[in-house]
Image: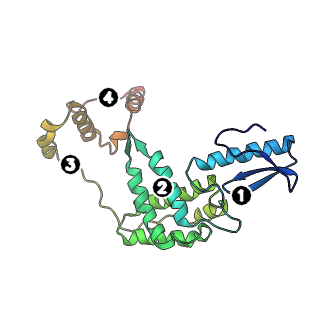
């Protein structure tokens, strides 16, 4: 087996008369030296070792040990800082994960990941309720906590049964947390006072919201409006502007 620079070597273990590779100080015995089966096991072990190294986490643990929730959170945080970036800047999702994971760290950070079950998730959710966060946001934060554990499952840091158990915890129902005030329409008089400070594109978006009542125009696409206009014309309606 050729030896590659920077990669633990495939070698003969004379005492056991078999192939071996040492990863992070632990010997992995591969079977009969120079056999196709041992070469395949070596390639598989190196591939998994390289995959684990991409998250800058310890690749193996001593038998019988268990990762703590803090270790999982640290690994996930390194991943999140690279994943949730736009134009070189962290997105708002980073702040959301920080809020979601704070009660997890405070209540269960030193506990093993296998001890974090549905009741633990509900306890963290109650901390978010006590913080005065609205129901919709809390349900989103609970989803982020589950996402972290699901991410850990993919890297074999968390048993799959832990994540599946967390999915059993239902979201908050109406009335179980702070209710947010409805978003009210801005008067045309207030809009008129800021028109001089808006770019043509933003002013067009403001006017379109005023005319149509569209709540989330920023995520809309031009094709959606074309399809809507085509549907009106197909039914025999005229597409009119506000002045008609």
Label 3, secondary structure: give it: loop
| Residue 169 visible (yes or no) | yes
Mark 3, mark 1: which one is toward the viewer? 1
Q: Quadrant of residue 158?
A: bottom right
Q: Residues within 10 Å of mark 4 (few under 14, many from 20)?
A: few
Q: CA distance from mark 4 to mark 1?
A: 71 Å
Depth check: give the residue in front, 18 or 186. 18
Instruction: Measure the alpha-carbon separation of dots 2 and 3.
Output: 39 Å
- Distance of mark 4 from mark 3, alpha carbons? 24 Å
Please state the horizontal and vertical placement of residue 30, each as a whole percent of the image. 81, 50
Label 4 with label 3: CB-CB less than 8 Å: no
Q: Earlier in the sequence, mark 4 or mark 1?
A: 1
Does 95 sit left or right of 23 as displayed?
Answer: left
Which label is found at residue 153? none
Mark number displayed over residue 77: 2
Eye-nearest disc, 4 or 2: 2
Label 2 Cα crowd, 10 Å radius (few <14 / some 14-19 / many 20+): some
Left or right: residue 22 versus residue 106 is right
Kindly indicate whether the residue at mark 1 contacts the one at mark 3 (C-beta within 8 angstroms): no
Of badges 4 and 1, nearer the viewer stands 1
- Dot 4 lies on which element? loop
Disc 2 to disc 1, how far (Cα)?
A: 27 Å
Quarter-of-image position of residue 3: top right
Mark 3, residue position: 186
What's the colour scheme?
A: rainbow
């Amino acid at each position: 087996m050729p030896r590659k620079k920077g990669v633990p070597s495939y070698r003969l273990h004379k005492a056991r008369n078999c192939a071996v590779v040492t990863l992070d100080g632990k010997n992995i015995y591969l079977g009969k030296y120079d056999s196709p089966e041992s070469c395949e096991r070596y390639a598989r072990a190196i591939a998994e070792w390289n995959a684990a190294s991409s998250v800058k986490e310890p690749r193996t643990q001593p038998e019988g040990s268990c990762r703590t929730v803090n270790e999982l959170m640290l690994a996930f945080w390194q991943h999140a800082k690279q994943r949730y970036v736009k134009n070189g800047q962290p997105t708002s999702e980073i702040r959301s994960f920080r809020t979601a994971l704070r009660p997890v760290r405070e209540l269960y950070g030193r506990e093993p990941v296998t001890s974090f079950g549905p009741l633990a998730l509900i306890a963290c959710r109650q901390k978010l309720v006590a913080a005065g966060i609205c129901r919709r946001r809390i349900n989103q934060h609970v989803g982020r906590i589950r996402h972290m554990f699901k991410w850990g499952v993919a890297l074999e840091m968390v048993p799959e049964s832990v994540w599946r158990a967390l999915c059993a915890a239902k979201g908050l129902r109406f009335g179980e947390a702070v209710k947010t005030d409805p978003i009210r329409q801005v008067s045309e008089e207030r809009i008129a006072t800021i028109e001089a400070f808006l770019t043509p594109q933003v002013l067009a978006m403001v006017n379109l919201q005023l005319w149509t009542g569209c709540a989330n125009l920023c995520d809309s696409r031009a094709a959606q409006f074309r399809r809507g206009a085509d549907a009106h014309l197909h039914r025999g309606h005229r597409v009119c502007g506000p002045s008609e």
